[in-house]
């Protein structure tokens, strides 16, 4: 018996126990699949903080819906699909949120070239200790993933 089939038999037993409500068995499933779920979430979200939230949400959804799983041997593909669906949902809603924010801001908020000349800081005043204007929006201090 190789390691893959041993893992598969242990996982199927844990899935069946988790379907009966065994929290310890589900904890073992989470521990054995957390790297897989996190890597899928990170590949889609491209942000470690967001991917952790997605992973947690995927496991929570799996716990709530594990009794609906018909074939315990298909737990891993089922969990991967839950993770992908959650990640795509989060990315879709964050894009909508960013779009709504962009639509509600005045055009001058996003365009540094539309700042009046008297507000701009010249190169000589920077050398005298004046702070330069921020190059990015204060709402999004770091670069957004596409």
Image (cartoon, grey):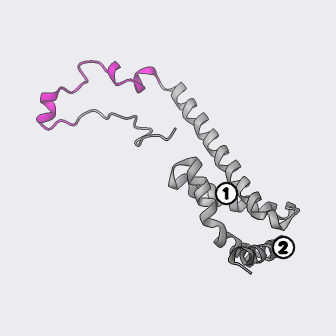
Determine the image quadrant of residue 71. bottom right
Q: Which residue is drawn at 59% across and 48% down?
A: 44
In the rendered image, the vertical position of residue 108 relative to residue 60, given as above or below: above
Kindly identify which residue carries mark 1. Answer: 57
Cβ–Cβ under 8 Å for marks 1 and 2: no
Horizontal side, residue 122 vs residue 42: left or right? left
Numbered mark located on residue 29 in the image: none
Q: Where is residue 98 in the image (x, y as percent from the top left)?
A: 54, 34
Sequence-first disc among 1 and 2: 2
| Mark carried by residue 16 | 2
Which residues lie in the magenta part?
Answer: 106-131
Q: What element carries label 1?
A: helix
Q: Position of residue 54 (x, y in %)?
A: 62, 54
Residue 86 at x, y percent in the picture:
68, 50
Residue at 75 percent of width and 75 percent of height: 5
Q: Distance between the residues labelled 1 and 2?
A: 21 Å
Residue 45 as seen in the image, left or right of residue 136: right
Q: Which residue is drawn at 86% across and 60% down?
A: 68
Residue extending furthest front? 1
């Amino acid at each position: 018996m190789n390691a893959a089939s041993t893992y598969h038999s242990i996982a199927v037993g844990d899935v069946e126990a988790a379907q009966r409500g065994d929290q310890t068995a589900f904890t073992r499933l989470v521990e054995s699949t957390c790297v897989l779920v996190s890597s899928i979430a990170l590949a889609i979200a491209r942000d470690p903080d967001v991917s952790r939230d997605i992973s947690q949400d995927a496991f929570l959804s799996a716990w709530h819906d594990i009794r609906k799983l018909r074939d315990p041997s298909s737990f891993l593909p089922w969990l991967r699909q839950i993770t992908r669906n959650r990640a795509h949902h989060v990315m879709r809603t964050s894009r909508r949120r960013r779009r709504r924010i962009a639509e509600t801001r005045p055009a001058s908020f996003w365009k540094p070239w539309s700042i009046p000349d008297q507000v701009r800081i010249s190169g000589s005043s920077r050398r005298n200790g004046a702070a330069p204007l921020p190059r990015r929006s204060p709402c999004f201090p770091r670069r957004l993933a596409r």
